[in-house]
Amino acid sequence: MAFFMDPGAMFLGCLNGVEQQFLIELIKTARQSGYTRFVEPCAGTFAMANLAIQSGFKPEQIETSDVNMMTSVMGYAITDQSLAPLEIHAQGFTDEELLDPAVALYAQIYLRTSKNAGNEYYHNILRDLKVRREEHIESIRRQLEATKSLLGGMSYRPLDMWEHIKEVMDDPHTIIVANPPTYFAGYEKFYDTQGKMTWKEPSYGMFDPETGHQALYDLMMDAPALLLCYQEKKQGEAVGHTIFARSGTRADITSYITTNREEEAVALANGKKIKRPAEGKLEPLKCSMLPLDYEITEQSTVQVIPIAGANAQYYRMLWTHNFVGSQATWNRALLIDGYVAAVFGISKMAADSIFVWYVMKAPHEKYRLGRLCYMLAQNRCFVDTLLDEIDQEKVVKMRTAMLTKYAENKEVRGIMKLVNRQTDAQNGYKLTYEADLVRDRDEKATLAEWLRRERKWQESRQQK
């Protein structure tokens, strides 16, 4: 079960790597400019506090709070507070053993999973949790110790976000970084054990993104403290001054970082709204590029192979005049009869889908090689090579987005379905496409289907 096998898994935030780097630069500059107090309400898994440490803040300068039990147990463990005041009770566990933070976190996960035990998938997870109980508890204990070594010295309280913000908003030396729930009753739904586990829960109001962000900025717009807030909204619906935006998180949704003081926040981020990652070195593969007039047949051999980022950057620079170095989790090359025909990059951007970041192909006088890449990336057997068993169960779709001056992209016509079209001031349109993954289609079958479609397309062009 992947959640427990990675010693750092419990403490990963929801932020993309590019967003993290953007925030680290901003927070570091803020610290150097005189901000001495870092506040993270809605602390979750302490992702923002981790960024503050990376930015040079000392743990003693960091204040955190939350209203859910899992975060409170973690926060108390990190800050060496006894769990007794939390008054935790759980079905099947003694009150005494629940004073151990690792056991308390295990109990919460176990009982949260048990509510879905009628589902075979969750039943298997529950059985694993029970059979390997001590192993899971020890894994959680290691994660807690690792985070305590990083964040030990910070403060934590079970506290409503609004109360914490009102306490610190008048301090001009405070930077507040908030990451409230992205959907209504997010904490309640995620941590629900159907009453099998209880604790001395603080009073709080549930955060509704439909109205909560506006209320937050109504409160903070003229406050001396600097506010940064992470939001996931439809394009153009972010509340506050936007200083960072990243599309493609999931259909119709854009990730935003907003602030109450635009000019200052932009200046702290070194005057750049988006900090692009370094391009790195460029390195070709040890095989030739597909010739311009190469004839591809059903007898050709098609391979998709893993490549390094430096390999991908080389061909992307070579094959496009307007290179933008977006980063993908997995970079792959398409080889046809041993020749490099294309490169493409994929990440897992949403629970139910993979996201194709880019497709760059060798020029060819006859074939549309990009379409072959999309078709190969759509295959269930290919996607399963990227994901662990849990993600394989969840991921059922492939998505991509592109900026273009045209209202439709012909390269993916017939492969993917247009699910969103938005106007873009600079490029014309932003198009989002989606398709279900294809089962029982391997590379050879994909090649045959692609060739059939290409020949049909070529015939239709000749008839015009």
Image: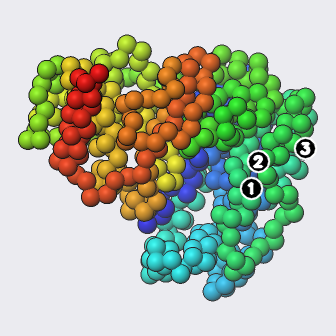
- The amino acid type found where label 2 is placed reads Pro
| Residue nearer the viewer, 419 or 214 | 419
| Badge 3: residue crowd in 10 Å (few <14, some 14–19, many ≥20) | few
Callout 3–callout 1 Cβ contact below 8 Å: no
Determine the residue positioned at 57% across, 33% down.
421
Tag 1's secondary structure? loop
Q: Quadrant of the C terminus?
A: top left
In x, y percent, where is residue 326? 45, 28
Identify the mark nearer the N-term, 2 or 3: 3
Looking at the image, which is closer to me, 98 or 349? 349
Task: Report how far apart the C-alphas of labels 1 and 2 lie in the structure.
Answer: 6 Å
Give me the residue at 59% from left, 47% from top. 14
Inspect the image, locate mark 1, and give the three-letter code of the amino acid beneath it. Phe
Number of numbered markers: 3
In the rendered image, which residue does mark 2 sit on?
A: 209
Q: Earlier in the sequence, mark 3 or mark 1?
A: 3
Depth check, mark 3 against mark 1: the one in front is 1
Q: Look at label 3 and name its amino acid.
A: Lys
Left or right: 254 with respect to 63? left
- Drawn side of residue 318 relative to residue 209, left or right: left
Seen in the picture, residue 172 relative to 355 is either above or below; the reply is: above
Query: In the displayed structure, would residue 231 be above or below residue 320?
Result: below
Q: Quadrant of residue 309?
A: top left
The residue labelled by disc 3 is 166
Residues at marks 1 and 2 touching, judged by CB atoms closer than 8 Å: yes
Q: Quadrant of residue 34?
A: top right
Q: Nearer the viewer, residue 155 or 332?
A: 332
